[in-house]
Image (cartoon, rainbow, N blue to C red):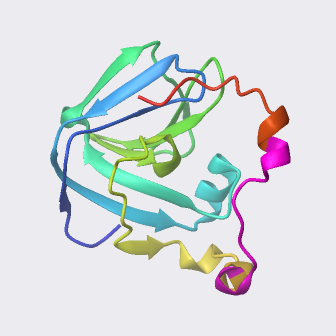
Amino acid sequence: MTNAPQDYPDARGGCQCGAIRFFIAAGPAKAGLCHCRMCQRATGNAFAPLLEVPAARVSWAGVAPSEWASSNISQRGFCPTCGTPLYLRTDDTFEFMAGCLSPDVPFLPQDQGGMEARKSWLDALPSLPAHTTRPELLAVVVSHQSKED
C-alpha cells in the first residue's frame, strides 16, 4: 500500500471461535486491497482487504496466533483453533484482514496492489443482483462463531 496513513480510532477484532482477540490503539493506519496471487491463496478469496498498523500499537488476548512463513519477508498469522486468517506480518508491521476487524472499524481502502493478478470478474459485481441473507437460511443456521466484541 502506498498512500499516506489515515487516522483511525481504537479498533479490535479476532477470530471466528473467539480464542484470539486483538486490540489496535488509535493512530495512523493504511487500508488497502491486495489482489496478488499470494494474498488470494492465503485468504481463499479474490483479494485481501488489509489494514496496515505498526506492531507497537497491537495487543493480544487469548491464545497466541500460529504463523506460517509465506515468503522470505513475511509471516501469515491465523488462529490455531479455527483457522481464521488474521494478518500478514512483515518486520514491525501487521496488516490485518478486514473481515476479522469488528464491524464498527471504519475500513475505507485507499489503494489496490497486485493488480497483475486481479480477477477480471470483479468488474461485473456492480451489475449483479444483490440481496440480504435469505430468512429461510437464517432460520436453520446455528452459528458456532463467537459473539462480536
Q: Quadrant of the N terminus?
A: bottom left
Q: Quick check: 113 left or right of 130?
A: left
Identity of the residue drawn at 61% across and 33% down: 84
| Residue depicted at 57% across the width and 68% down the height | 35
- Where's residue 106, x and y in %? 32, 56
Give residue 131's position: percent from left, percent from top.
72, 66
Is residue 146 at all visible to an observer of this figure?
yes
Q: Is residue 92 above or below residue 125?
A: above
Q: Considering only vertical position in the picture, is 106 above or below 89?
A: below
Q: Is residue 132 magenta?
A: yes
**Residue at position x 57%, y 23% from top?**
146
Identity of the residue drawn at 75% across and 78% down: 129
Q: Residue 97: give x, y in percent of width and height.
A: 48, 47
| Residue 35 shown left or right of residue 25 in the figure | right
- Please give the range of residues in magenta: 125-137
Please state which of residues 138 and 44 is positioned toward the viewer in this rendering: 138
From the viewer's side, name the closer residue of 106 and 22: 106
Q: Quadrant of residue 140?
A: top right
Any part of residue 120 in sight? no
Q: Find residue 116 and report its horizontal and vertical position in percent.
A: 60, 79
In this view, 148 is above or below 81: below
* Residue 13 lies in the magenta-colored region: no
Q: Quadrant of the C terminus?
A: top left
Q: Nearer the viewer, residue 46 or 15?
A: 15
In the depicted structure, whether residue 79 falls above or below residue 11: above
